[in-house]
Image (cartoon, coloured by chain):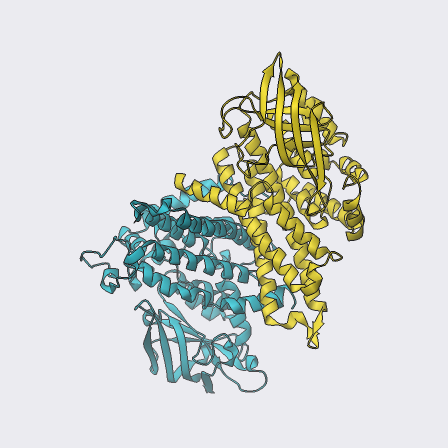
Amino acid sequence: MDFNYTDEQNALRDTLARFIAKDYGFEQRRSLAKSEEGFSRDHWKQFAELGLLALPFPEAHGGLGGNAIDTMLVMDAFGRGLVLEPYLTTVIVAGSLVREAGSDAQKEDILPAVAGGERLLALAHYEPNGRYRVSRVDTAAKPKGEGWVLSGAKGVVLGGGAADTLLVTARSSHEPRDEDGISLFLVDRRAKGVSVRSYMTQDGGRAADIRFDEVELGPEALLGNLGAALPDLERTLDYGRAALCAEAVGIMTALNEATLEYLKTRKQFGQPIGRFQALQHRMVDMVIATEQARSMATLAAVKADAPNAAERRRALSAAKAYVGQQARFVGQQAVQLHGGMGVVDELNVSHYFKRLTMINATFGDADHHLGLFSDMLLAA
Amino acid sequence: MDLNYTPEEQVFRAEVRKFVTAGLPADISAKVKGGKRLAKDDFVRWQKILHEKGWGATMWPTKFGGTGWSAVQQHIFEEECAEAGAPLQLPFGLKMVAPVIMAFGSKGQQDYFLPRIVDGTDWWCQGYSEPGSGSDLASLKTKAERKGDHYIVNGQKTWNTLGQHADWIFCLVRTSSEGRQQEGISFLLIDMKTPGITVRPIIMNDGEHEINEVWFEDVKVPTQNLVGEENKGWTYAKFLLGHERTGIAGVGRSKAALHHLKDIARNELSYDKPLMEDARFRDRIAQVEMELMALEITNMRVLSAEKEKKGGHAIGPEASILKIKGSEIQQTIAELQMQALGHYALPWLPEALDPAWQGEPVGADYAAPLSGHYFNYRKTTIYGGSNEIQKNIIAQMILGL
């Protein structure tokens, strides 16, 4: 075991911290959230220049060959800054899926373009009626000639409106809830038959509900093996979960800093409210929750790369559940300790709180993953 | 940053496991695993076995005979000992008085006491709390008056753990009433055989004799048994608390307890199926397991960072985090173990805790100690500085509130 970051990782942290401090002030971020696309193409270019967009990809395809600890550091910093750019969806989730499942030709086509900031991706997987069940896929892919015809609907596709290429799961065989028979297809967001309804999310991000009406795909659209997408999909979602855990910890750290500062400066009854023991102990509970969550987020990052799927799944469900619980506590208490200021739009606290809350609802919430983790105890 | 064990650490674990499996007497591990009453000799025998291996005081600095292990190695050792059913190495000598003697004691004190601690010769107990001085420890009243080459000690200590077996007690005593109350405290080492010392049992809520009151009536203590300087005892007392809290997370022992809980839940039946298959109960096991997974990493993060920072083995206020979470987890597991028994949480058979008892168990053979253990373990959030005091420490020392 080793609890230190490498020199390169420390340099990365410094770079990220400088970027957040300089380019991601609260007011800058607020206006960005209200803009047409909801994020900045200039920032995205900067990410490409900094190498962030190439981080988890193999060197053979223009990447830097980083691991999940590297992307954890990025997401932690992005949490502190409440970064709006679609890094999670393009690089960590969809990018990793191309890396895991793609042919050499597909990787060469897509990954360098992502790393260079020229192409945005999104994973279109969860469906309106499936809630968090990963194997629930109703969207159908029917063979036609050499290729396929895609029909169905996907719900709350993160970054779906801005994506150039959608990675769409569809059922090429078996029944809607079966683990077998799920395939992945690369679909041009602007292709005929694709209709995208994009909207703002509670946390200032963007997502979309997407319909596929008889979308015709060539044979080259298939990503990975026919009917066998689930293992790669699960691994990729676990990368996403690890990233969300890291982002949540970044946010919790920032919220604790803000709350501690508030306790020291806000005066009532002639003294800083941080003198009151009830509030001191609450603050301590928030700090402990954050440190425990940081430990679990680190475990999530390390185990996301684990070759053994059962070991990885167990750790990632535990982490997503646990971090979700701690994030809920820290978010709610940060609001509470800020009093009325905690519930207004003009202070960053409410924005941090909303993002934490939406992180919990993404890729399976705390109850869902507690259930999965608990069920795995039966096998252990 | 890598939370996977290195090949070297895996080899180390195998070495520890091999030694503990072979070296730990079967009768002792049977008692520990079965929740039976442990005798003084059980603790002492295990300490002597560890000492012969050179592992009697793994956490000590190497110059005093410690191992110089990393935080991860220390963790592996504790985990393997707990899983094998080794008795806890009691902290009073090893982790409490020894670091104080190393840092502030005379050469003579170091040469005499330290070897006798590590080889199991001397059993130490603690004389800190008093009836009127719990969390507000500095208000203590036990008085030591200097008379020539000795002190005369009068007063009463309480919440003294296992002092009925002790050869020595380390005591905080008042040597001055001048100035702030913290400034009149001294740290004395007292031979328990000295005339005037009376040990009276306090029976705990599990019916067991674990703790005592210790009375001092004109007890003569040679001045050479003063540690460091007179009236500087409060400094040493605080130093001691920093060391007591190493290992306070109790991760290894909680992992073993969690393991036991799962075995119980697989064995107990509810609606004709193993209790483990009841999702409502299983989720509570899952919840505490997640807490423990997080604490295991937090524990090693904190200890590794502290080791690098100070090069020593004392830990700062971050240890309070470990104490709070560690004690909460211990209590939760104990509670679930009891709850898993259903109605069989009710029978109280203190005789069943006697290792020599041959009677027929009531309920499952693991049932007898569990409710008492739950009641007893409410102590964990109270002792060693209550969890509320730990929160005060974090608020002041880390957060600056």
Residue at image coords 51%, 44%: A368
Instruction: Identify the colour of chain B in the image.
Output: cyan
Q: In this rendering, is residue B95 above or below B147?
A: above
In the depicted view, which residue is nearer to us: B238 or A227?
A227
In the depicted view, which residue is nearer to us: B196 or A294?
A294
Q: Is residue A54 left or right of residue B176?
A: right
Q: Is residue A327 left or right of residue B174?
A: right
Q: In this rendering, is residue B106 above or below B68?
A: below
Residue located farthest toward the top when viewing the structure as drawn: A145
Q: In this rendering, is residue A333 above or below A16?
A: below
Q: Where residue A54 sits: x, y (%)?
A: 71, 33
Q: Where residue B292 sits: x, y (%)?
A: 48, 51
Q: Is residue A58 visible?
A: no
Residue located farthest toward the left when viewing the structure as drawn: B359
Q: Where residue B269 sits: x, y (%)?
A: 30, 48
On the rendered image, what quadrant is the N terminus of chain A found in? top right
Residue located farthest toward the front when viewing the structure as drawn: A213
Q: Is residue A191 left or right of residue B76?
A: right
Residue at image coords 65%, 40%: A70
Instruction: Identify the colour of chain A in the image.
Output: yellow
On the rendered image, what quadrant is the C terminus of chain A found in? top left
Q: In this rendering, is residue A146 above or below A36?
A: above
